[in-house]
Image (cartoon, helix red, strand yellow):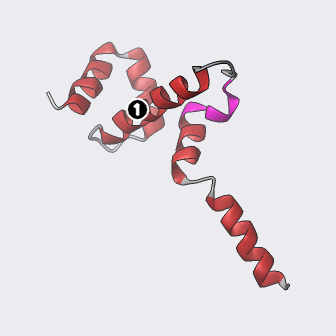
């Protein structure tokens, strides 16, 4: 087994860390989550994925991080995100 084979194995391994997980970690600090008990991890994972989807679908050239921070400070912008996502 040569270097090429090991390279493929490593690439397949890191393929598990897909784009969605990377986005959740970068924008929502998913890897730092301390939620560990009961249904908490699954519930928070669902909420984080929904929040990320809403931010990504919001029109505009701002990054997801900027949109997230703006929504945290500006309730009108947060409402705009929610209404856009719901199709109203």
Which percent across, then down, holds residue 9?
A: 74, 71
Q: Secondary structure at mark 1?
A: helix
Q: Does residue 81 appear left or right of residue 40 in this picture?
A: left
Q: Residue furthest front?
A: 38
Residue 56 picture quarter: top left
Q: Residue 62 in magenta?
A: no
- Mark 1 neighbour class, 10 Å CA radius: few under 14, some 14 to 19, many 20 or more: few
Residue at 54% from the left image edge and 39% from the top image edge: 24
Q: Number of marks in the image?
A: 1
In this view of the protein, which residue sits in the foreground, 8 or 68? Answer: 8
Residue at 60% from the left image edge and 26% from the top image edge: 41
Q: Residue furthest left?
A: 88
Residue at 33% from the left image edge and 45% from the top image edge: 61
Which percent across, then down, holds residue 51?
A: 41, 30
- Quick check: 38 above or below 68? above
Q: Residue 30 in magenta?
A: yes
Q: Quadrant of the C terminus?
A: top left
Q: Does residue 35 appear left or right of residue 19 in this picture?
A: right
Which percent across, then down, holds residue 49?
A: 46, 35
Q: Quadrant of the N terminus?
A: bottom right
- Quick check: 67 above or below 1? above
The magenta stretch spans which residues?
Answer: 28-33
Q: Does residue 37 appear left or right of residue 68 in this picture?
A: right
Q: Which residue in the protein does label 1 denote?
A: 50
Tell me the chief SS of the magenta region.
helix
Residue 27 picture quarter: top right
In this view of the protein, which residue sits in the foreground, 39 or 65? Answer: 39
- Quick check: 72 above or below 56? above
Residue at 31% from the left image edge and 41% from the top image edge: 57
Residue 84 picture quarter: top left
Which percent across, then down, holds residue 13?
A: 70, 61
In this view of the protein, which residue sits in the foreground, 45 or 53? Answer: 45
């Amino acid at each position: 087994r040569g270097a090429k084979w090991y390279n493929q194995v490593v690439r397949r391994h890191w393929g598990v860390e897909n784009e969605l997980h990377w986005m959740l970690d970068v924008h929502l600090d998913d890897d730092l989550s301390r939620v560990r008990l009961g249904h908490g991890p699954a519930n928070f994972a669902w909420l984080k994925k929904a929040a990320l989807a809403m931010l990504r679908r919001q029109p505009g050239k701002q990054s997801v991080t900027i949109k997230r921070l703006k929504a945290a400070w500006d309730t009108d912008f947060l409402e705009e995100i929610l209404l856009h996502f719901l199709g109203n």
